[in-house]
Structures are given as structure tokens and as C-alpha cells.
């Protein structure tokens, strides 16, 4: 029995390995068409979608994706067969028209852009469904599979489709490379682009055209419903990993290509699994990982950074309390009990104990039989926090004309984030003052 189980596991493992080798060898033309087509679709869409995302027009892709359906249906009615180039031309025209109408409605009426997008999306999609129903009842045998534009079916891609996708992908990527600087300026600051004398409307028109082309290319893989995710999600994920737009666009293309390859592989090893939805699931998984785990911008990093800042503020407040006690008794190295510190400033007892132990590890304070006292480094750090607090109070009263009894809370916050450069500027601006608005001495080393 055990030998049989082992043999079955070995056969399954061998079968999986054979499937893996067969898929990535690309010997089967059908696999080759699906894989290359999916990669071209997803990568080129992600590149163009990066600029749509940066311009904060994420919903535009959704509107275009729904607006191309009547164009597909109209092209089929006029031409009579499912030629990919003819269908793409029809889809492009209605998709482009939808964006022009959205801009026109937003500019010429009191309707806001998001409302205009919803209006155009629903109207065009309703017309597309109506036309698709007429085609399905027409009895034309060539219409079989036309409804795949709703949900996509990358597994049905053939060589003719691949040629069309390759041509459009080259157009998209070439246009982005050629106009990369202009698209970047337009995405971040349209007014600055106008100041430089750039033809803003013409550049926007080119970007709109590329967005429509990207959507038109992608609908056959992931469908009308999911295309907006393919356009925007890779860019949104890439944005979490970098501050440089060149790297962001490259990462978006890589995320898109990887999701296209993964979706094709999953649908290959599990034939009942559709390619398009799995492409979107993979890229959405990448996005969720990016949202949580990306350095500097990810949620986990920000939570850790917030905890770190809270610890820093708590520790500096402890040092400040010890310094105030030292000021009162003219002895900064006197040993203090926890009770004395709590009398000077309200701390949560647990956070105070943890902070004292942390400061001891860092060498800022020492402990002797439950009594805490400054090291020289701790005294200097506490002195700087007090100095920044009092300088900021003086700045608020002298330059912003705020009453002295209203500046403490603001200074209690800002003292923890003032850099040495700002500290030097404050000193120079205030002409190295001796006392704060409350006549307390401002300590200098």
C-alpha cells in the first residue's frame, strides 16, 4: 500500500515536471500564441497605464473598456467576420469617442468627471450588449465566440491575433519611449508643461489614444470587465516600490508580463481555469504584497516606522523630564526614582519603564538600585530637546504672533522632528536668544 502511494506521488511529480517543461519549451504553437500574446498584452497595457495612474485617471480605463464593446459589435456587423484588425479598429473608434465625450461633458457642463465616466460607461456598455444580442440572434455562424470580449479568453488566441497584438504593442512602447519626458511632465504638473510651451492638448490626445489602444488590445485576453484592473493594477503596485518614474514604468511592465505568463501557465496546468481572470488574480496578488510589504511606502513599513517614532518621542520626553528635574535642582546627574519622573511629566507607567530600559541600553541613562540618572550623552540629548522646544516657542510668539500660553503644545510636537539644519536656521533667525517666552533659559552647549 505504501509502495503504491509513493509510486503515485512520483508519477504526479513527474507529470507536473513534464507539464512545466512542455509549457516553457514553447514547442506547441497554441501555447506559444497564448504565452506571447498574454505577455504582450499585459506588459504594454501596464506601461501606458502607468501614466494614466499618475494622472489620477484610473476610472478612465474602466470607461474605455466598457465603451469598446459597441465598436466590436459594429465592426462585426459591417465586415461579417471576426478579423482581429477590423475588430480592433471598431473598438478603438468607440473607445476613443467615449474619452472625447467624457472630456466634453466635464468641460461644457456642471457634471463632474466621475459622473461623466459613469454615464458614458453605462450608456456605451448598454448599447454594446444590445448589439451583441442582435448579433447572437442573427443566425450568423461567424459570431460564435464574439461574447468572449465580455470576459476574455486568452486561450483562444491564434497567430493572426498575435500579429495584431505585436504591432500594437510595438506602437505603444515606441510612443511611450519617444514621448517619455513629455508624458512625465504632463502626469505630474500640467501647468508646468504649459509654461514650458509644450502642446498639452496634443500630448493628452496622444496619451488618450495610447490608453484606448492598450484597452482594445487587452480585452481579448481579460475581457471588458477586468481590463481596467490590467491597465492600472501593475502601475499601482510598482508605485509602492520606487520614487523614480523610469523604474516604476519598468516594474509595471515586469509585473504585467509576469502576471500574463503566470495566468497562461495556470490555465495550462488546470484546463478548466480561464486565463484572463487568473492574470488579474496574479497581478492583484502582486499589488496586495506591494501594498503591505514594499519598503518605505508599504503598510507594514509605515506601521513599524510609526511605532519607531512613538518610541523616539517617548524616550525624548523621558530625557526632557530628567533635564527639567536637573534644572530645578541645578544638578543634572542626580539619581531619580520613577515616582519623581512621573511627578514631573505624566507617562504611562509601563511605557516609562520600557523607555528607561531602552535608554539605558543606548547609553543615555544609568540605573543604580532602582534610581535613574543621566550619562553625559543623555544629558546632552535631553538638553537639545529642551532647547528646540524653547526655540520653537519663541519663534511662534515673535514671528506668528501667537500668545505665549498657546505655544507649548505645538512646540511639544515639533521638538521631535526639527533637524540640525532647521535648528541652526532658528538660532540664526532668532539671533541666538537667551530665554524663551516664559523667561526660561534656552540651553546652549
Image (tube, rainbow, N blue to C red):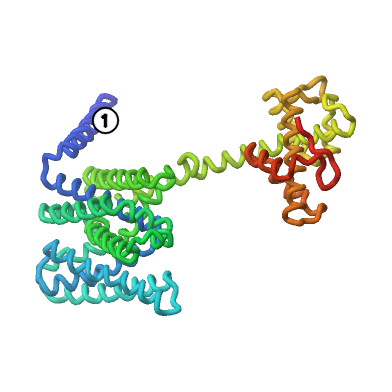
Residue drawn at 30 percent across, 59 percent down: 227
| Residue 271 picture location, percent across and down | 22, 48
| Residue 88 picture location, percent across and down | 18, 64
| Residue 310 picture location, percent across and down | 66, 40
Q: Is residue 29 left or right of residue 368?
A: left
The answer to whether 253 is drawn above or below residue 148 in the figure is above
The answer to whether 140 is drawn above or below residue 158 in the figure is below
Closer to us: 235 or 286: 235
The local secondary structure at tag 1 comes to helix
Which residue lies most toward the bottom here? 109
Is residue 289 visible in this depiction of the protein? Answer: no
| Residue 160 picture location, percent across and down | 10, 55
* Location of mark 1 (residue): 9
Residue drawn at 30 percent across, 43 percent down: 254
Quarter of the rendering occupied by the C terminus = top right
- The part of the image, by quadrant, that contains residue 23 is top left
- The part of the image, by quadrant, that contains residue 193 is bottom left
Amino acid at each position: 500500500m505504501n509502495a503504491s502511494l509513493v509510486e503515485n506521488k512520483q508519477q504526479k511529480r513527474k507529470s507536473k515536471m513534464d507539464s512545466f517543461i512542455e509549457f516553457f519549451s514553447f514547442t506547441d504553437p497554441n501555447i506559444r500564441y497564448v504565452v506571447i500574446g498574454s505577455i504582450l498584452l499585459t506588459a504594454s497595457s501596464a506601461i501606458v497605464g502607468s501614466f494614466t495612474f499618475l494622472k489620477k485617471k484610473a476610472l478612465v480605463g474602466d470607461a474605455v473598456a466598457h465603451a469598446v464593446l459597441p465598436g466590436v459589435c459594429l465592426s462585426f456587423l459591417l465586415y461579417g467576420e471576426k478579423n482581429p484588425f477590423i475588430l480592433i479598429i471598431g473598438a478603438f473608434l468607440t473607445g476613443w469617442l467615449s474619452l472625447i465625450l467624457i472630456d466634453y461633458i466635464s468641460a461644457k457642463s456642471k457634471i463632474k468627471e466621475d459622473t461623466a465616466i459613469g454615464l458614458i460607461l453605462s450608456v456605451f456598455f448598454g448599447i454594446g450588449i444590445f448589439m451583441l444580442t442582435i448579433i447572437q440572434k442573427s443566425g450568423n455562424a461567424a459570431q460564435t465566440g464574439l461574447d468572449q470580449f465580455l470576459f476574455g479568453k486568452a486561450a483562444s488566441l491564434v497567430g493572426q491575433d498575435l500579429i495584431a497584438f505585436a504591432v500594437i504593442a510595438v506602437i505603444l512602447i515606441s510612443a511611450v519611449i519617444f514621448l517619455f519626458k513629455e508624458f512625465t511632465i504632463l502626469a505630474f504638473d500640467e501647468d508646468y508643461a504649459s509654461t514650458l510651451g509644450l502642446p498639452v492638448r496634443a500630448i493628452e490626445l496622444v496619451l488618450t489614444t495610447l490608453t484606448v489602444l492598450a484597452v482594445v488590445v487587452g480585452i481579448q485576453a481579460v475581457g471588458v470587465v477586468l481590463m481596467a484592473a490590467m491597465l492600472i493594477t501593475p502601475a499601482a503596485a510598482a508605485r509602492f516600490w520606487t520614487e523614480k518614474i523610469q523604474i516604476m514604468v519598468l516594474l509595471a511592465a515586469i509585473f504585467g508580463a509576469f502576471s500574463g505568463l503566470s495566468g497562461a501557465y495556470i490555465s495550462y496546468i488546470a484546463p478548466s481555469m480561464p486565463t484572463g481572470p487568473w492574470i488579474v488574480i496574479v497581478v492583484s496578488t502582486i499589488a496586495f504584497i506591494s501594498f503591505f510589504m514594499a519598503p518605505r511606502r508599504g503598510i507594514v513599513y509605515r506601521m513599524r516606522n510609526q511605532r519607531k517614532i512613538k518610541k523616539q518621542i517617548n524616550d525624548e520626553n523621558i530625557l526632557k523630564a530628567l533635564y527639567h528635574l536637573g534644572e530645578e535642582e541645578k544638578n543634572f546627574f542626580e539619581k531619580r526614582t520613577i515616582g519623581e519622573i512621573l511627578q514631573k511629566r505624566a507617562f504611562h507607567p509601563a511605557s516609562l519603564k520600557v523607555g528607561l530600559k531602552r535608554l539605558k541600553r543606548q547609553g543615555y541613562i544609568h540605573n543604580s538600585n532602582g534610581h535613574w540618572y543621566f550619562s553625559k550623552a543623555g544629558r546632552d540629548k535631553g538638553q537639545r530637546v529642551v532647547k528646540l522646544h524653547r526655540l520653537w516657542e519663541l519663534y511662534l510668539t515673535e514671528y506668528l504672533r501667537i500668545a505665549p500660553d498657546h505655544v507649548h503644545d505645538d512646540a511639544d510636537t515639533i521638538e521631535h522632528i526639527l533637524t540640525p539644519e532647521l535648528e541652526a536656521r532658528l538660532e540664526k533667525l532668532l539671533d541666538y536668544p537667551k530665554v524663551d517666552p516664559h523667561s526660561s533659559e534656552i540651553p546652549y552647549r
